[in-house]
Amino acid sequence: MGTSTARRSPATAVWRFAKGAATRYLAPEGSGPAAAREVVRRYVAALEETQVSQGQDLLAGFRLTRKAAQYLGEFGDTAAASGLTAALKTWGLAEAALFSPDAAILGLTAAWVGEEGGLEAAVARSALASGLDRIIAGNPAGAADFDGASLVRSFLARALFQRLVLDLGESLEAAAPDWATYRQALTGLEQALLTAAAGASAEPPPAGQWGGLAGWIYITKIMEHITQVSDPLVPGKPRS
């Protein structure tokens, strides 16, 4: 199936449960919504174990992602209120978008994530680019039919999805009989996270306040909702 996108994840019991769930998910009888949710549950438990071993909580591993989401939320609200061109102009990228949507997307991701290195920064850039491409490349000068909150929810879900694929991709690829099945499985996992993000009940901050405490609290609540899962089959204390 080509070069694996996986990186070597830890080999603890909880990570083995996550990899096992990924393998079962690709079985003919396992590739449904419930199986996708199990993979996500097991993965979040494993990711949390790793963060705790480093003396941090789960969301500490997404601090840079949440900061980028604040910029994205403000950008989305500006675009919804005044149009995409106005939102791009705020970052000096309105003209760039007309000639090269990719340049505008790269400009935004660079401004919002900075020159940070490491896995989280790489995933944040990729997830941002994926969402912005749907907006800027599709309609570089038109009115926006979205808002900051919807963009933020999708971005946070896709960031976690991309982390999952990097950590469990080897198990998923090994179990997939062909490329089409593998891609379908990834779509199911992404949709499970997007559905979780859409179901979060939290009030987004008013326009102009995404960069402050209100924006940070909202984004944290969405991230908590996406990751707030427990599985009694996973060793350890379920999260409350």
Image (spheres, helix red, strand yellow):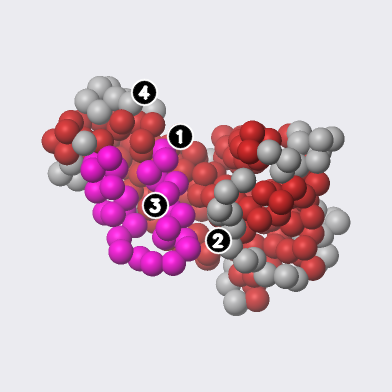
The residue labelled by disc 4 is: 145
Instruction: Answer left or right for 122 relative to 138.
Output: right
- Asked if the magenta segment contains residue 129, the reply would be yes
Label 1 environment density (alpha carbons within 10 Å; few <14, some 14–19, many ≥20): some
Q: Position of residue 25 (x, y in %)?
A: 76, 43
Dot 1 amino acid type: Ser
The residue lying at 41 percent from left, 38 percent from top is 131
**Residue contact at pointers 1 and 4, CB within 8 angstroms:** no
Quick one: 131 or 149, which is closer to the camera? Answer: 131
First-in-chain label (3 vs 1): 3
Quick one: 55 or 35, which is closer to the camera? Answer: 35
Dot 2 amino acid type: Leu
**Residue contact at pointers 2 and 1, CB within 8 angstroms:** no
Image height of 41 relative to 17, above or below: above
The residue labelled by disc 3 is: 125
Image disc number at residue 150? 1
First-in-chain label (2 vs 4): 2
The residue labelled by disc 2 is: 59
